[in-house]
Image (spheres, grey):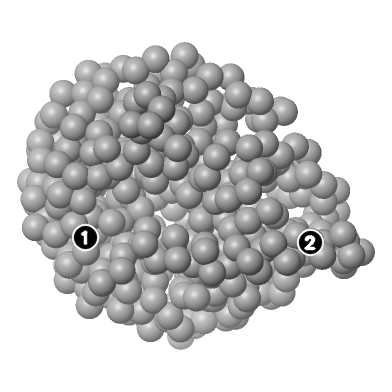
Amino acid sequence: MKFAWQETMNAIQRTTRVAAILVATASLIQGCAGIRLDRGLREAPYDWLTFGGAASRVNQSGSVAAPPLQAVWEYNALAGIRGTPLVKDSVVLVVTLSGEIQAVHLTTGERVGYMVLQSAVAGTPVWDSSFAYVPCALGSETLTCIGLRNAERRWARDYGSIESSLLLHGELLYVTTLDGIFYCIKKSDGMELWKFETAEKGKRKPIRSSPASDGTAITFGSDDAYLYAVERTSGKLRWKYQTGASIFATPVIAHDICVVGSLDGLVYALQMGTGKLLWKYDTRSKIYAEAAAAADSVVYIGSADGQLHALRIDSGARLWSFSAGSVISSAPLIAGDVLYVGSLDRILYALNRQTGEKLWQYEAPGRIRVSPVIWGDVLLLTSEDKFITAMRPAQP
């Protein structure tokens, strides 16, 4: 069976040729291509501007869309989608494996603009004010700043292959790379401020895990099986902890505890300040999920056997588990008392967050391997290969 990272690599290779053609012809179609947001977008507390909704990657929505839901539109991005959509005001930003960033109207589902990048986008960008910072998997421009008001590239830099999602803190961007290097970058010009190398050249393993932060330190996993914590301002190693296998998942940070799943099937909880192991929980299956979700002292994490586990974040005690029909490879989304989780069985499940009881389900056009997002009362569901479905609470 092929899991998330293997399929992403295959999709990137398939679409790189298409992206190259699009880049080569971009100069011929600039009159009709481009993203131009002619007005300033209003900010709301439930805007979804980064992977996981926050630097801590807790996947907790500031708004609620209570089930049952009904589809109001479906958008075809014409290429595979691996990053979560970002939403601000009435605009949805979508990135694709053909190397496009697309702007979609939240109300109608109509595309209002797009730009062509140099290669596939496998991670989630960051949306900051009127700028989008976008990672690319290949090429000589693997990190790009796009001005959304005037449809221009503010800067583009080469930081090696990036298949993870970006982290923004103030004026600084943080990114992990397949070269095994973690970078701190100035968002103003894209120049490197410092870098942390997990090992010497030739011995480094790829980093597919996206960075998470509590504001003082940044954590990420690596294919070398270590979970790293580095000081946010200096890049100095705070601690590292060795698990039993590669870590593809992104850590989640809550209550000064860092929680991450590993391919060894274990969930690890470590104290952010010291790296001390607090507990381990055995899911008995590999954990490919992008990340977990956390709220109210509970962490929710899925595994390759289709089980979703609700664990106390202070002790690792299991509160409940839920069986989906196939692999869970994306993070659940917390929306009030409801937990939304998708599976490769094409089903989006809505669960009671306290008990794990299934409240409702929806069959998507394809397999679900990207976390849903909620803005206002609209839930955006991404499914293979190229669809985004907008859903609202069903009218009585």
Q: Which mark is residue 370?
A: none
Picture residue at 27% right of the left edge, 33% below the top: 227
Residue at left offset 45%, top offset 37%: 179
State how far apart marks 2 and 1 are (Cα).
41 Å
| Amino acid on which disc 2 is placed | Ala
Relative to the observer, which residue lies in front, 41 or 344? 344
Q: What amino acid is at disc 1? A: Ser
Residue corresponding to mark 2: 24
Q: In the orientation shown, which residue stands out farthest toward the front?
A: 202
Residue 64 visible somewhere in the drawing = no
The mark closer to the camera, 2 or 1, is: 2
Above or below for 337 versus 228: below
Packing grade of label 1 (10 A; few <14, some 14-19, many >=20) is many
Label 2, residues with CA under 10 Å away: few <14, some 14-19, many ≥20 = few
Give x and y (percent) for residue 352: 24, 65
In the picture, the disc for residue 303 is 1
